Each structure stands twice: as structure tokens, then as C-alpha cells.
Image (tube, grey):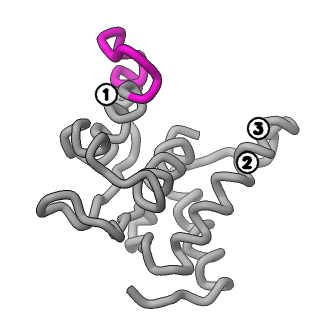
Amino acid sequence: MADVAPEVAEDEFSRMCEALDLDLDDLDKEDDERFQLLRKTVLKAIVQGRITVDQDGLATVHLKYPVGDVDSLRFKIPTGETLIALGDQKAKNQTTQSWKVLGDLTEKPSTLFGKMRQSPDLKTCQALGALFLG
């Protein structure tokens, strides 16, 4: 994985936010602090080459530690299905609920995220998932 210049990472991050139609102008203090933490995590991963942003502004996470034969995950634009996964009452806790959301966003089984190393791979996916949900 090639390193990316910080300025290029900033541009890629901006393109991704535009593709997601994120409204960042009216964030209150708490939401802005949360956004800045997500931004920092995602920018670091872009600089390290662990996230690439395609021509449509969508992110692909390149796993540092592949899970089985899965070495990358392409995130898609959230839909109503994503919101259903977010509100899934069968999910016993927030962790399994977040895996279901990540599964929907990546079109991979939610169980994949339970097998993933926490850092840096799951942490990166969770930051993207939170960012994609706005």
C-alpha cells in the first residue's frame, strides 16, 4: 500500500463527503467533535493507503489483516436497508448492530466484522460506517 500525501488525502476525504451528501455546515459542538474524530481516523487510513476513494467518491478499505479470502471492503451509499439494519431489534447489543450496518454498507456478512482485528481494520470500518451514516 502506497502512502498518500496529506493534501491528496484531504481532497479524497472531501470528495467522499460530497458523494455522501453530508451536510457539515450546521453541526453543533458535540457533532463537530465526533465528526473531527472520524475525520482524523479516516484521513490517517487514506494517508497510509488503507482507504482508497474511487471516481464516484466511495471508499474501499484495504485490510491490513485479511479475514479469510477478504482483503478489501468497498462501502456503498447507505439506503433504507441500512437504516433497517441500524434498527434491527434482533441485534442483541450495539456491537452486533454495528456489524449488521457494516455488513449492509459493504454487502458482506456481518459475521466478518466479528473475525476482524480491532485495530486498525475494524476501527477504520467503524469510522467509515459512522461517517457514511452522517
Residue that carries the numbered disc 2 in the rendered image: 24
- Which SS class for mark 2? loop
Dot 2 or dot 1: first in sequence order is 2
Residue 29 coordinates in the image, percent (x, y): 87, 38
Residue at 81% over, 40% down = 26
Total labels drawn: 3
In the displayed structure image, the side of residue 101 where residue 12 appears, left or right = right
- Viewer-proximal residue, 70 or 12? 70
Which mark is drawn over residue 90? none
For disc 3, the neighbor class at 10 Å (few under 14, some 14 to 19, many from 20) is: few
For disc 2, the neighbor class at 10 Å (few under 14, some 14 to 19, many from 20) is: few
Residue 76 coordinates in the image, percent (x, y): 34, 50
- Viewer-proximal residue, 53 or 71? 71
Q: Image height check: is 25 above or below 53?
A: above
Residue 126 coordinates in the image, percent (x, y): 48, 46
Marks 1 and 3 sit apart, C-alpha to C-alpha, by 24 Å
Residue 60 coordinates in the image, percent (x, y): 36, 65
- Which SS class for mark 3? helix
- Which SS class for mark 1? helix
Which mark is drawn over residue 81? 1
First to last magenta residue range: 83-95
Q: Nearer the viewer, mark 2 or mark 3?
A: 3
Check the image and name the residue furthest to the left: 69
Snapshot quadrant of residue 99: top left
Marks 2 and 1 sit apart, C-alpha to C-alpha, by 24 Å
